[in-house]
Image: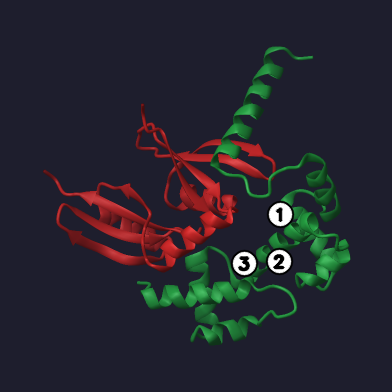
Amino acid sequence: MLTKDHITRLCRARDRLRDVGSTESSIDDVAKAAAMSRYHFVRQFKAVFGETPVGFRTRMRLDEAKRLLVGSDQSITQICMTVGFSSLGSFSFLFSRRFGRSPSAYRQQLKDSGEDLSPGCMDLMRGALTKKSQISRSIASPE
Amino acid sequence: MRIKLNSIMVDDQQKALDFYTDILGFEKSLDIPVGEFRWLTVKSPEGGETELSLEPNVNPAGKTFQEAMFEQGIPFTAFEVDDVDAEFERLSGRGVAFTTEPTDAGEVKFAILVDTCGNLIQLYQPKAA
């Protein structure tokens, strides 16, 4: 059974793993700060957050990269290094796998479309319903 | 006026869909791409009209609220079950973490699980009248 103390320590560890870039702590250091062995830490982290600490950190790096692609003028290479990737190839591969577009295509498309980075419930529903009606119309009257 | 839709914030929609369907046992209902996100809902195979929307918690205000509730140990969402002891056994066997084992609380018996997406979920079993 997870205790409140376990939850608190795991949340603090998650907060540390969010800190991507040059000040990153190693997984061993984060486990140590959470007062757990690395094995126990990885196991408990996955049970609570559904992904390994390394997987979580990679997701945080990609999310931060996404923000920088839209909100800064840094080059793709600079962003890759800023969020803690050492290889542009792996950054581009992981970014494309997660967001379905390369970093440069993502930057261009979002700037062109003005898409919202943080859609709310109603934005998603409206978008989904619009898309659904477009699909229905194209089925009803194919061009 | 009817209640047919409720929402829960999740930190990753695909991870949430996997957990809510493969582990908990709900069924996917709507899955419509909206930009890089999805309008994604699940429903119970046991009937009822209400759907649960798995919302991305990318809004910082929502994320702050969700994390505070989680760290304080408060389940913001609850699902009714027929037998909370049986669900506890079934889900524990599938690797689900619980913060509270089945506990009598007057009119209901409840347990609290971690949904791996940033939420605590209460399962409650109303006591027979």
The hue used for chain A is green
Q: Is residue B24 left or right of residue A30?
A: left
Vertical relation: A127 (above or below) B128: above
In the image, what residue type sits under mark 3? Phe
Quadrant showing the N terminus of chain A: bottom left
Give the colour scheme of this rendering. by chain
How far apart are labels 1 and 2 at the CA level? 11 Å
Q: Viewer-nearest of labels 1 and 2?
A: 2
Q: Is residue A113 left or right of residue B65?
A: right
Q: Chain of mark 1?
A: A
The hue used for chain B is red
| Label 2, residues with CA under 10 Å away: few <14, some 14-19, many ≥20 | many
Instruction: Label 3, secondary structure: give it.
Output: helix
Vertical relation: B42 (above or below) A86: above
Residue that carries the numbered disc 2 in the rendered image: A61
Q: Chain of mark 3?
A: A
| Residue A29 in picture, x, y percent from top left | 61, 86
How far apart are labels 2 and 3 at the CA level? 9 Å
Instruction: Label 2, secondary structure: give it.
Output: helix
In the image, what residue type sits under mark 2? Arg
Residue that carries the numbered disc 1 in the rendered image: A98
Instruction: Tell me if I can see residue B95 in this picture.
Output: no
Sooner in the amino-acid sequence: mark 2 or mark 3: 3
Instruction: Label 1, secondary structure: give it.
Output: helix
Residue that carries the numbered disc 3 in the rendered image: A56
